[in-house]
Image (cartoon, grey):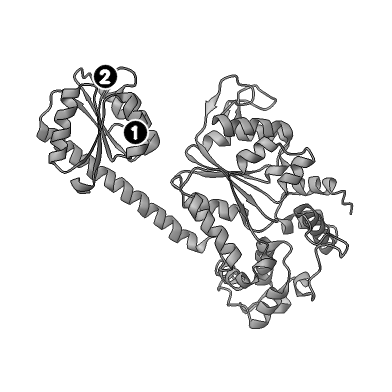
């Protein structure tokens, strides 16, 4: 990094020292910004976005260590150099442990200070380039993994908005029918964010009973319930500086909704059985296949939690509304599937097979398509998927409608979900275990949905 591009924030409560430093660094071509106190430095960190912060330690109000903590929070790659006239081994060790680039004792020679700042600028540049390189490597690696695939206008618009919001910390709410790829888009947002080098953790809110869900989210203390043999951090703490994905958010109980709302508002949690709060730093992404506004009208979902989650809303279109994406999805899935026996790759589908796939309505969306191709890959002997290898329901023409003719012209997600569950159960001859696999949900979630929709087999 050349000195011309380096922004440096100089912080000292002594005007004479600040003026001398300003003249020194201006003469070396730095982009110089001044703060006459630690408090002023805290206020201008986000406005300036410096590459280097050179600050005195002992200042009234906010100290240099306070500036260091704020700078590390704002940008971990920011180089912070601390100056003091009262150096001690203890304070030096503390400063380095808290992330300071260098600890400098006054008085110092100008040449020494400039050399340290040049090294700091180079170190920051290396960190920035390394972070960018890691992000690019992750994106390339994900080329062979599950990722958002599509060229249809509706889906491309979703991806563009996802790419736009990814660098922010805004909470995102993903809506759409089951199997449309909401978790894939959530991971895509995480991979494009500044949190990509941290963890992406998720939980299915419908897969766990209320007590266990609360413990998993917020953690618990030893002895807080039967089986709690030691303290345990919740997933919201474990996802520190990363992304947390709440799938099937509408399945969360009202009591847990209250606690999640507090975590969103206050950015802190209280573990089960504890009295002290634990701060969290995590980006929230939630998903549902239900109409949350309808759930609010039914009294099943809190309106205040909905507005906290619905900062940025992305609606994923069903596969039947983006049929032009089916060949791309098929090609991507087949790259990852070995033929029967695992000794050779699957060949591209025959034209007849693609016609069958394009004609089907895919009520289970992308997840159902992937499951159908996996089944076909097992059935094929020569590596080429033919129509005969596809499930019977896919080969049926016309595709079975999701809703009856008497249904509204624009059925709700709830109506579609109920019809789809009923249809999958019928297709699987009432076998709930296989139906749950096709639906891509846990058997316990399926049983709850059967009770909710009063479906009996």
> SS class of the residue under badge 2?
loop
| Residue holding disc 2 | 58
* Figure check: 38 above or below 243: above
Q: Residue furthest bottom?
A: 351
**Residue 30 x %, y %:** 19, 42
**Nearer-the-camera pick, 297 or 254:** 297
**Residue 232 x %, y %:** 57, 29
Q: Residue at x 55, y 23 (%)?
A: 277
* Figure check: 436 above or below 346: above
**Residue 279 x %, y %:** 51, 28
Upstream in sequence: badge 1 or badge 2: 1
Mark count: 2
**Nearer-the-camera pick, 382 or 103:** 103
Q: Residue at x 85, y 58 (%)?
A: 430
**Residue 319 x %, y %:** 67, 65
Question: Are there few (<14), some (14-19), or many (20+) residues within 10 Å of tag 2?
Answer: some
Q: Residue at x 52, y 59 (%)?
A: 160
Query: Horizontally, is 7 left or right of 277 in the view?
Result: left
> SS class of the residue under badge 1?
helix
Query: Horizontally, is 53 left or right of 251 in the view?
Result: left
**Does the image show residue 206?**
no
| Residue holding disc 1 | 44
Which image quarter is the C terminus in?
A: bottom right
Q: CA distance from mark 1 to mark 2?
A: 19 Å
């Amino acid at each position: 990094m050349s000195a011309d591009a380096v922004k440096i924030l100089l912080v000292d409560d002594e005007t004479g020292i600040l003026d001398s430093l300003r003249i020194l660094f201006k003469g070396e071509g730095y982009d110089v910004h001044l703060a006459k106190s630690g408090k002023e430095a805290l206020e201008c960190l986000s406005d300036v976005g410096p590459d280097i912060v050179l600050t005195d330690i002992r200042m009234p109000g906010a100290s240099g260590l306070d500036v260091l903590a704020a700078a590390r929070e704002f940008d971990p790659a920011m180089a912070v150099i601390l100056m003091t006239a009262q150096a001690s081994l203890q304070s030096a060790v503390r400063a380095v442990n808290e992330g300071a680039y260098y600890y400098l004792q006054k008085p110092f020679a100008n040449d020494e200070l400039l050399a340290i700042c040049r090294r700091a600028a180079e170190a920051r540049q290396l960190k920035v380039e390394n972070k960018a390189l890691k992000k690019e490597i992750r994106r390339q690696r994900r080329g062979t993994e599950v990722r958002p695939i599509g060229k249809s206008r509706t889906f491309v618009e979703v991806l563009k908005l996802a790419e736009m919001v990814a660098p922010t910390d805004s909470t995102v709410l993903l809506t759409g029918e089951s199997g449309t790829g909401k978790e894939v888009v959530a991971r895509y947002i995480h991979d494009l964010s500044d949190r990509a080098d941290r963890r992406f953790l998720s939980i299915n809110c419908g897969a766990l009973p209320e007590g266990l869900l609360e413990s998993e989210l917020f953690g618990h203390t030893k002895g807080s319930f039967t089986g709690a043999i030691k303290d345990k951090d919740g997933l919201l703490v474990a996802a520190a500086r990363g992304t947390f994905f709440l799938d099937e958010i509408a399945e969360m109980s009202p009591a847990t909704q209250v606690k999640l709302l507090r975590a969103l508002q206050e950015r802190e949690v209280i573990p089960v059985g504890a009295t002290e709060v634990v701060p969290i730093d995590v980006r929230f992404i939630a998903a549902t296949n239900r109409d949350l506004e309808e759930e609010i009208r039914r009294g099943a979902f809190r309106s205040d939690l909905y507005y906290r989650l619905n900062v940025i809303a992305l609606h994923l279109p069903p596969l039947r509304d983006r049929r032009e994406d089916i060949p791309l999805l098929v090609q991507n899935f087949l790259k990852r599937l070995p033929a029967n026996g695992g000794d050779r790759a699957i060949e591209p589908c025959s034209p007849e097979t693609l016609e069958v796939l394009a004609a089907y309505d895919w009520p289970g969306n992308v997840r159902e398509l992937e499951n159908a191709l996996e089944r076909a890959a097992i059935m094929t002997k020569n590596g080429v998927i033919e129509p005969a290898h596809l499930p019977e329901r896919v080969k049926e023409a016309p595709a079975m409608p999701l809703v009856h003719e008497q249904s509204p012209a624009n059925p709700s997600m709830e109506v579609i979900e109920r019809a789809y569950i009923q249809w999958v159960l019928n297709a699987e001859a009432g076998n709930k275990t296989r139906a749950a696999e096709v639906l891509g949900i846990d058997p316990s979630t399926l049983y709850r949905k059967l009770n909710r929709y009063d479906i009996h087999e």
